[in-house]
Amino acid sequence: MRIKTFEEYQVAYKQSVDDPEGFWAEVAQQFQWRKPWKKVLSWDFHEANVKWFEGGVMNITENALDRHLAERGNQPAIIWEPNNPEDQAVSISYNVLYDRVCRFANVLKKHGVKKGDRVCIYLPMVPELTVAVLSCARIGAIHSVVFGGFSAKSIADRINDAACTMVITSDGAFRGSKVIPMKETVDAALDQCDTVKNVIVMTRTRTPVSMLKGRDHWWEEEVKHVDSNCPAEPMDAEDTLFILYTSGSTGKPKGVVHTCGGYMVYASYTFANVFQYQPGDIHFCTADIGWITGHSYIVYGPLCNGATSVVFEGIPTYPDAGRFWQIVERHKVNIIYTAPTAIRSLMSYGLDYVKKYDLSSLKTLGSVGEPINEEAWHWFKDNIGGGTCPLVDTWWQTENGGIMISPLAGITPEKPTFATLPLPGIQPVLVDENGKEIEGNGVSGNLCVKFPWPGIIRTTYGDHERCKQTYFSTYPGMYFTGDGCMRDEDGYYRITGRVDDVLNVSGHRIGTAEVENAINMHLGVVESAVVGYAHDIKGQGIYAYVITEEIPDDPDMFRKDIAATVSRIIGPIAKPDKVQFVTGLPKTRSGKIMRRILRKISEGDVNNLGDISTLLDPTVVEDIKKGAY
Ligand code: PRX
């Protein structure tokens, strides 16, 4: 399963294309299955149907926990680094994690949660988040983790879409110097949800919270009264493991569905190979478990490999910009996996924060979430990796389950700003506007994948048609990623960014339509159009053009009010960075907003707007260029 040389990579890649079923069956055999699968793969991209290891019976927690107890029961599974560096870090061994998961799984059962039920998890980065996720998996309940920065309305939308029957949350969260309410936000969400019967509340900040008799229960009390034995629920490989909501170019966020067997195999295989994990390595992924990166590379990938995974509660700049490096030194981290936005932000504080710490334990650096610019790539490689640690720029998406295009650390070549080569099993293609494959090297196009891999999205929860439309209809017969990409003369891939109306702000995926809908809900707003613009730290910033009923008396205050509404409707991550009030928007005769023009104006490229003759009213462009008011 482990690739150790470039030649082995080439052999594995070829085998994965010539005989994908044989290739993945061999990988999958290394896991623990209760019953072997009957069929490795069946697929039909036209109907968006893919099944891996059908008929196989397993439980991912037996692979993430039980399997390791005999050999490494006392090894830390998780090292928890709290928000405040003066508080003691907590090390949780595989034995203890197993015990906590079994107990909490029994708490879920006691409250009537069964296989197939949906459980919403809204927690800060505390060990209980990992425990909650694995406890759901233990009993076959489907977890839907919602990132702790989302608003009550976003939580409610997700709970209602999946008809969750339980929510797991905390009283509050520590985030840098702030204390953030969690339960209060869940309470506001639950005013809009009928399906939730029980809420389990973990104590973190011990801020006052309302606890409703019959519905709300304290985590710490609940776990006192349950058995520590909880046999894992037998799951078919194609039973749903989790739902994770992500933004697209239209409508509300959709629930990406991943299933047990294929996801386990893919997240684990990619973890081991991309980072070249060695037994005993300490792995620090700085993402939040509320995103797919945390699911695959804090929880499931590392634990299925028996690794030690660092869970960090805080933020990179608290109490100062040396926090990541302090954690590396403190826990002798071997692999650090972070995002370009964090690197760019930390770069701006200077090297003094880096030099204070001993980073010699590091062996591998990883980047994910957005294109990494050359300057950030070199800064990371030279100053954090001492110029010698391999740096893997990993491209993938929520819908992919695991890393798709990336170097294998120290094994396959690196090229700054390039995700480089596809992993075994991944068959990328570039297509032109008409869906025609662009062959050869030194070319650019829209990135598709023409063959399934075990971690591919199975459906969008409750709406299979939407899955078909979003990913499999633009270029029939292929999975469309929504990304633009170039393949250079050497056949290396470089992701250039989204080609649809999806923004990537600090590595977070945000739909322009979602932000527009939120802005349009603000009193006095007639219409809005949102585009991304190049932002030094965030990668992309959010630029909103807003038409108001009347010219605002105090435009700055109005801007702040709009930001407050967006924060309330979606969450602070979606707040516009810039709001320009305009009297009209550039629309085609059929009413479609020409974002291409707005993007150029937002980047200050006003003399190069291209053809505007198809606009219903070309004069609006002049007004926008002037900055109407
Ligand atoms: O545009 C690509 C960008 O992030 C998108 C996926 O976002 P999400 O589903 O939130 O998952 C993020 C983490 C897996 C992609 O469509 N993206 C992700 N990684 C890279 C990237 N763009 C360039 N280079 C990357 N390494």
Image (cartoon, helix red, strand yellow):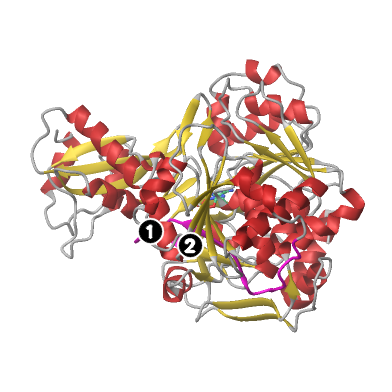
Q: Amino acid at mark 2?
A: Cys
Sequence order check, earlier mark of 2 and 1: 2
Q: 508 left or right of 606?
A: right
User: Dividing the image into 4 quarters, which one contains the C terminus?
Assistant: top left
Q: Residue furthest right?
A: 71
**Residue 324 screen position, x and y as percent:** 65, 29
The image quadrant of residue 273 is: bottom right
CB at disc 1 and ligand 1 closer than 8 Å:
no
Determine whether the residue tagged by mark 2 lies in a helix, strand or loop: loop
- At x 20%, y 33%, the residue is 558
Q: CA distance from mark 2 to mark 1?
A: 9 Å
Q: Is residue 70 visible?
A: yes
Question: Which residue carries the number 2 mark?
Answer: 164
**Residue 275 screen position, x and y as percent:** 75, 47
Residue 193: assigned label? 1
The image quadrant of residue 92 is: top right
Q: Residue furthest bottom?
A: 38
**Residue 95 screen position, x and y as percent:** 82, 48
